[in-house]
Image (cartoon, rainbow, N blue to C red):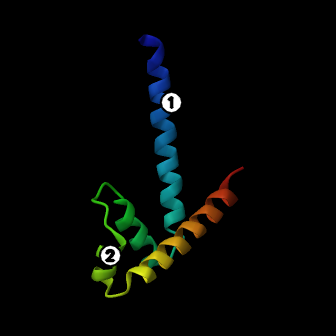
Amino acid sequence: MLGTAPDVVADAVENQCEQERLGRQLNKLSGREKWVLEMRFGMPGGAKKTQRDIAKLLGISRSYVSRIEKRAINKLGKHMSAEEP
């Protein structure tokens, strides 16, 4: 069991680095895009919400929430691939 401790620590450090990287990229999104993703995926440490729940909170259609979410995820993907060495 002692041989697994370095692996656990390495995994924890890698996970923390990925979360910090994601946080930097989320800050590049518009306020609404960032808020929708945070609500959808329960970040940081909150409860996940459905597109319908978010639509009610914002007073918009569920399909519009879906479009905002899709656009934000696409932007995140582009920003994160551009950041990789």
Given this view, does label 2 or label 1 mark the residue nearer the observer?
A: 2
Which secondary structure lies at badge 1?
helix
Q: Which residue is mark 1?
A: 10
Q: Nearer the viewer, residue 36 or 26?
A: 36
Q: Nearer the viewer, residue 62 or 80?
A: 62
* Residue 67 image position (x, y, % from top left): 50, 78
User: Mark 1 belongs to which amino acid?
Assistant: Ala
Q: Give the residue at the far top of this rendering.
A: 2
**Residue 19, labelled with which disc?**
none
Residue plotted at (48% across, 13% down): 3
Where 56 falls versus 81 (above or below)? below
Where 43 falls versus 55 (above or below)? above
Q: Is residue 76 left or right of residue 4?
A: right
Pointer 2: residues within 10 angstroms few (<14), some, or many (20+)? some
Mark before the other along the chain sequence, 2 or 1? 1
Q: Which residue is mark 2?
A: 52
Q: Give the position of the N terminus as an image quadrant.
A: top left
* Residue 17 image position (x, y, % from top left): 51, 45
Residue plotted at (49% across, 24% down): 7
The alpha-carbon separation of the residues under discs 2 and 1 comes to: 38 Å
Residue plotted at (42% across, 67% down): 37
Q: Give the residue at the far right of this rendering.
A: 85
Residue plotted at (53% across, 54% down): 21
Q: Quadrant of residue 81?
A: bottom right
* Residue 85 image position (x, y, % from top left): 72, 49
